[in-house]
Amino acid sequence: MFKYLLLIALSMVMISCKSKKVSLATNDEEVSIADFLEFFQPMKLPYQVGDTILKRKEPESSVINARLFARFVPDSIITRLFGKEQHPHLYAIGKISVPDAEKYVFVKATTSQRRALYILCFDKKDHFAAARPVLYSDNESGVSGLATLDNKYTLTILHQRKGSDGQIVYHKDAYIFNGDAGLMLILTESNEQKTKAPPVYNPIDTLPRKHKFSGDYAQDKRNIVTIRDGKDASRFLFFIHFEKNDGSCKGELKGEAKFVAPGVARYRAYSDPCAIEFTFIPEGVSLKEQGGCGVHRDIRCFFEGYFGKRKTKEKPTDHKPHRN
């Protein structure tokens, strides 16, 4: 009898040890991808989450060590939005598993200035397959976000804001997971194009333009780069506004850039992960995004491309004929 009781007790201990979840708070080399995924609490479908989760304080028990996270998820997933110099705190939110198929894992990343909720996809063999931020904030007011994973595992991301005329402007994207293509966009819906596009306000238009590269560069009326004189010859002020995909993807940035080589300048500001390189030729300027500028633009477009230099319009002079 005692022998049977001992076997039962040992079995219970073994089961208890096996079911005990590991901690993700440290970079433990013994933590496997199976342990990593098992750590996340299961969630029920449909799962819907709004901006309030970005401001919510997460328990210490949900902390994920950044180095441990990077063992299973590419660094670029975080640096794309936060930049290489910022190191956000990571928290496990939960997971949704498809029987004998993929898993959807939700992770929250926060710094003092920026917060984001990511969805990570792992295939049926627990290999990382795709990821994207579904909600993000940099203290921008007036814009609300909502993400939903429905009963058919369709991910829908909705952003709304109130237009200047009081109308609610929305943009909705829907995705499904595809083993080969990752998160595949299947639907885009918006009323932004129905709203009359407001004029592009250029905050530095009237500033001096004496430097040889100062001037106005453009692809069209709504894709512009304005360069104005800086405090010395090695710097310049700039304003960029672009609209791509029929206006559904926009970006705008104002700042100061510094020349690092003849005809080449870079923008990099303290506390901003965004980095842009400007390459000038006499006929125009090319932009190349080199850091995480996601806070200044929509997710599916970038600060890049060539902008031709516009000819400076000379102000007409009012000459009156001389009378003898």
Image (cartoon, helix red, strand yellow):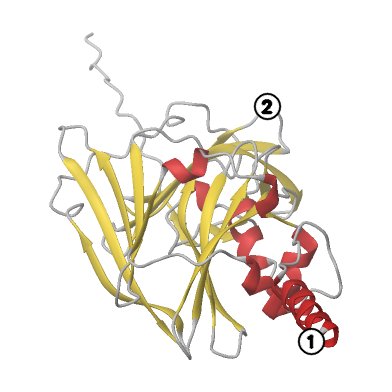
Residue 114 lies in quadrant: top right
Name the foreground residue: 92 vs 310: 92
The C terminus is located in which quarter?
Answer: top left
Q: Which corner quadrant of the image does residue 152 belong to?
A: bottom left
Q: Residues within 10 Å of mark 2 (few under 14, many from 20)?
A: few
- Taking depth in this image into account, of 247 and 185 the one nearest to the observer is 185
Looking at the picture, how far across and down is residue 209, in whole percent? 53, 33
Q: Is residue 151 above or below residue 88?
A: below
Question: On the picture, is 172 further left or further right than 300?
Answer: left
Q: Secondary structure at mark 1?
A: helix
Left or right of residue 126: residue 13: right
Q: Is residue 207 left or right of residue 40?
A: left
Q: Is residue 288 above or below residue 186?
A: above
Q: Please state the horizontal and vertical placement of residue 106, each as a whole percent of the image.
A: 52, 62
Q: Quadrant of the N terminus?
A: bottom right
Instruction: Determine crowd level at label 1: few under 14, some 14-19, many 20+ residues with C-alpha closer than 10 A.
Output: few
Q: Is residue 124 left or right of residue 166?
A: right
Res. 178 mark? none
Task: Please give the residue where the numbered disc 1 appears in the rendered image.
Answer: 4
**Type of amino acid under label 2:** Lys
Residue type for callout 1: Tyr
Q: Would residue 238 be seen by someone viewing this image from the given angle?
A: no
Give the residue drawn at x 85%, y 75%: 30
Q: Report whether residue 21 is seen.
A: yes
**What residue is at 21 percent from the left and 10 percent from the top?**
323
Answer with mark 1 or mark 2, whichever residue precedes in sequence. Answer: 1
> Which residue in the protein does label 2 denote?
231
SS class, disc 2? loop
Name the one closer to the observer, 252 or 132: 132
Q: Residue at x 18, y 55 (%)?
A: 193
The reply to whether callout 1 and callout 2 are in contact (CB within 8 Å) is no
Q: CA distance from mark 1 to mark 2?
A: 85 Å
